Amino acid sequence: MTEEIKADILLVDDEEQFLKVLSQRMEGRGMKVDTSTSGEEALSKVQGKEFDAIILDLAMPGMGGMETLKRIRSENPDVQIIMLTGHGSVEKGVEAMKEGAVDFLEKPADLNKIMEKVAEAKQKRIILVEKKHEAHVKEILQAKGW
Amino acid sequence: MIQTIRDIFRVIRHPGDLFSISAADPYKSLKIRVVLLDAILSLLPLVIVVTISYFWFQSILKEDYRSQIKWQIENTKQSLDFFIEERVSGLRFIASTFTYEQLSDRKTLANVFLKFKREVSGLVDLGVIDSNGIQQAYVGPYKLEGKDYSNHDWFDEVTVRNVYVSDVFMGYRKLPHFAIAVKRELPEQGTFWILRATIDVETLSKFASAMNLGAEDDAFLINKEGVIQTPSQFHGNVLGKLTFPLPGSQQGVTVHEITESPHHECTICGYAELKNSPWILVAMIQSAPYLKIPRIFKNELLFIIIISTIIGIIVVTRIANTLVNRIQEAEKEREDAIAQSEHASKLASVGRLASGVAHEINNPLAIINEKAGLIKDILEVSEDPSKNREKFLGLINSIFDSVSRCRTITHRLLGFSRRMDTAHELFDMNDAIREVLGFLEKEIMFRNIRLELVLAEDLPRLMSDKGQIQQVLLNIFNNALDALLEGKEGAITITTDSKDQKIRVSVSDNGHGIPKDKLKKIFEPFYSTKEKGKGTGLGLFISYGIIKKLGGNILVESEATKGTKFTIEIPTTSTSQ
């Protein structure tokens, strides 16, 4: 078992069984996992809470993975999204990355790989948040001028 | 080989068949026809031209040679006329210069004879005959003085006509001679006398043989009764009768051919009557060049025709072979290309199936993966695995569920691909449509497409090739899905109904539609309106072929930007193959 990573994760997939098992396993590795079975649900969850990473299935009925990705990114550009693709096609993955996903994984994916990607995503997010804070501090410094 | 010969005979018996190709072996039949037609077209003009030119050439030669012969005969005739004229004039001159008394003197006569002989050749003797027909004086090799000519024909003749040239006769020396006699009138005494000269025929015959003729030719004189007067090489001796009759005499020179001459195939006979003598000049020509040259010419022409026929037939056969082989190759290539495109289309639809199936299988596989991973996690963490027995069983059962989900998918795929090869079976069209839709339902679901099925309940079952019909349906459904626009709610309506032993399936979408100018081309091979790399351009081409083969019909209605409707009609019992 890899070392524990503390992270807030949102899992989005239409397969409930898959969600259940994967979240169990990730929680077993110390993560806080939230799940949604559709893009719409995921969107509403993202509005209420900030996640370290979102794992998003590409092929879903209703609002597809790609559409969900676009919508989440438009609301929160800093969010780290890892795509899961059942089609296993590199093309779709690349398309998703162009739309702002940080990475993509092919189904069925190895949990360790998922963990790695999540860790990377968290790292990136931390840097982003720090930069933001820095910018914010600078702004305050400049604005207040003391 | 036998077929070839039979075919040639058939064409000869029925020339109209030249343009209809036998079905048994169309290429061979075509080959024979090309060869025959080409040979006829190329050799017929050759034969015609050669034949015409042969006869033309012959007639020109004939005319040319005839006029040449005519001219020669005319020349010789004039020489002979002159020869005789010369002698007649000579005698006349002597008769008018000397008196009867002077010439009756043997000495004077001998003197005149010698002088005359010096001037004119062939003179044998000279005699003076009185009005009673008695030869009064004679100079010559015989003792003919006092001979009575009064009862000779020529004496009467010369008395009447003043001049007389005799036929040829054998003289006392057994040599052919002829005689010229001129009458001298003595009006004061009321009497006359005759001067008569005998001339050697040899001199005469020299003129005839001087005609410059070939070795096989013959020129001689005959008299009006057909008796030969001068030596002839082939037509009898002097004073012999000519073996063939000459046609009626005419003025001037006559040239004609004698074909029924006994010894020779063809002889040219030219003749002309002499002016002051009872003779006819005859030239018999065997060596006429136009009789021989055409024979050589004929052989040469025959040789040329045979050679060019052989060469022509060889070349034409070669060309026909190449031509027909090319056609055969092209046809085979076309068939191969169609077979290949059919295969490619099958592959394309299989590819589409495969990607759908892969997606469907990936989901349960992911579940299995995670469940197995969870079991592993629990085993690694927990000290006593038996505590988690219930949990394990639950996980393993859901693994089985996922496996059976995979199995259903693979079975469906196998069933579909197997049916691609089977032939006719009894099936329900609605079921067939639902089965095909089974492969596409995920895509329909993901893309939020509104699928409306208006399937007739009382649809009769049909006897046809289910696999192929499903291939067509899959192709049309795929096209409908591809036509739907992003960002607009897609709707596909599938309708079935039956009418007049036919089942009709309509698939309409509200996609981008097909512009009118492209609508005509959509059933053509390798024509695609899809973006590059997406369509093979074969789907509808193959579908069209399949539906036509099953005795059905495929129709399309479309309006650009509004949508497309495909309709297939299939007879419930397809008879055609």
Image (cartoon, rainbow, N blue to C red):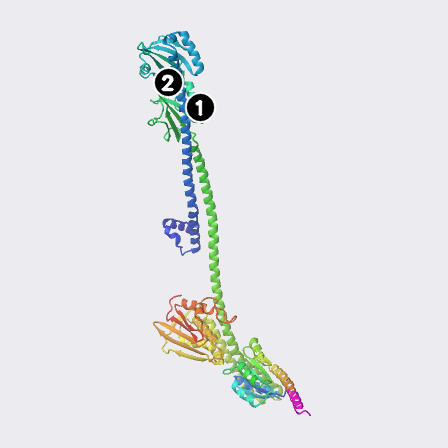
Asked whether residue A69 is drawn in magenta, I would say no
Which of the 4 quarters of the picture holds residue A35?
bottom right
- B123 relative position to A28: left or right: left
Name the amino acid, label 1.
Answer: Ala
**Disc 1, SS:** loop
Which contiguous range is marked in magenta? A132-146
Q: Residues within 10 Å of mark 1 (few under 14, many from 20)?
A: few
Residue at image location 46% in from the left, 40% down from the top: B303
> In the depicted view, which residue is nearer to us: B82 or B557?
B82
Depth order, front residue of B19/A28: B19
Residue B175 appears anywhere in the view = no
Residue B82: x and y in percent read 40, 21
Q: Chain of mark 1?
A: B
Instruction: Give yes or no for residue A143 being in the magenta stretch.
Output: yes
Tell me if label 2 and label 1 are in contact, CB under 8 Å.
no
Q: Residue furthest right?
A: A146
Identify the residue position indicated by label 1 in the image: B210
Chain-order first, disc 2 or disc 1: 2
Residue A71 seen in the figure? yes
